[in-house]
Image: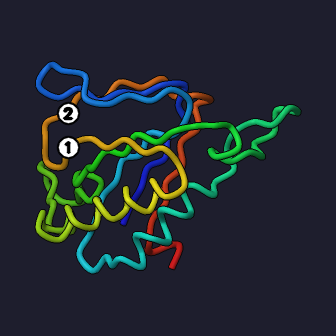
Amino acid sequence: MRVVVQRVKHASVTIDNTLYNEIQKGFLLLVGITNGDTIEMVEKIANKVVDLRIFDDEDGKMNLGIEEVGGSILSISQFTLYGDCKKGRRPSFIQAARPEISKPLYEKFNEVLARRIETKPGIFGAEMLIDLCNDGPITMILDSKDLL
């Protein structure tokens, strides 16, 4: 599992020319699921995301978590995080889990997040336009192979 965490001032997702979801201060998450991912991995990464202390305290140091600053999460599924560009010009997506595996895990990921913090998803498999204002810019990448 890979999650790109972007600290944002605001972010939104538009589907079929209609605003679907939006947040103000918080995280925009791009979420990729790979073959072999499990519910345990999903739970661990989701809690790691919420526990990240990447918001500034009163001294300007990244020392506060999303819960402490009253932030929200916009979570977007993105199988292209497992695109392999090593050979040729066209990426291979063989490492991305098939939808019948990745959709339930993505939904579980959002469920675990929502237990702790307001979480708004995109629509799995939809063509989405993402608009964001990256704050910092601060961007972190969490990968299950590095955390488990």
Kind of residue indicated by mark 2: Met
Rendering coords of residue 55 (x, y %): 69, 39
Residue assigned mark 2: 128
Label 2 Cα neighbours within 10 Å, binned few <14 / some 14-19 / many ≥20: many
The residue depicted at 46 percent of the width and 42 percent of the height is: 73
The image's mark for residue 94 is none
Label 1 Cα neighbours within 10 Å, binned few <14 / some 14-19 / many ≥20: some
Kind of residue indicated by mark 1: Ile
Rendering coords of residue 39 (x, y %): 35, 76
- Coloring scheme of the render? rainbow
Whichever of labels 2 and 1 marks the residue nearer the N terminus, that label is 1
Seen as rendered, the residue at the extreme top is: 17
Rendered image quadrant of residue 128:
top left
Seen as rendered, the residue at the extreme right is: 59
Taking the image as shown, residue 69 lies to the left or right of residue 130, namely right
Residue assigned mark 1: 123
| Cα separation between marks 2 and 1 | 8 Å
The residue depicted at 15 percent of the width and 60 percent of the height is: 93
Nearer-the-camera pick, 80 or 77: 77
Seen as rendered, the residue at the extreme front is: 115
Q: Are marks 2 and 1 in contact (CB under 8 Å)?
A: yes
Rendered image quadrant of residue 120:
top left
Residue at disc 2, secondary structure: loop
Rendering coords of residue 15 (x, y %): 17, 29
Name the mark nearer the viewer: 2 or 1. Answer: 1
The residue depicted at 43 percent of the width and 45 percent of the height is: 119
Rendering coords of residue 10 (x, y %): 48, 25
Residue at disc 1, secondary structure: loop
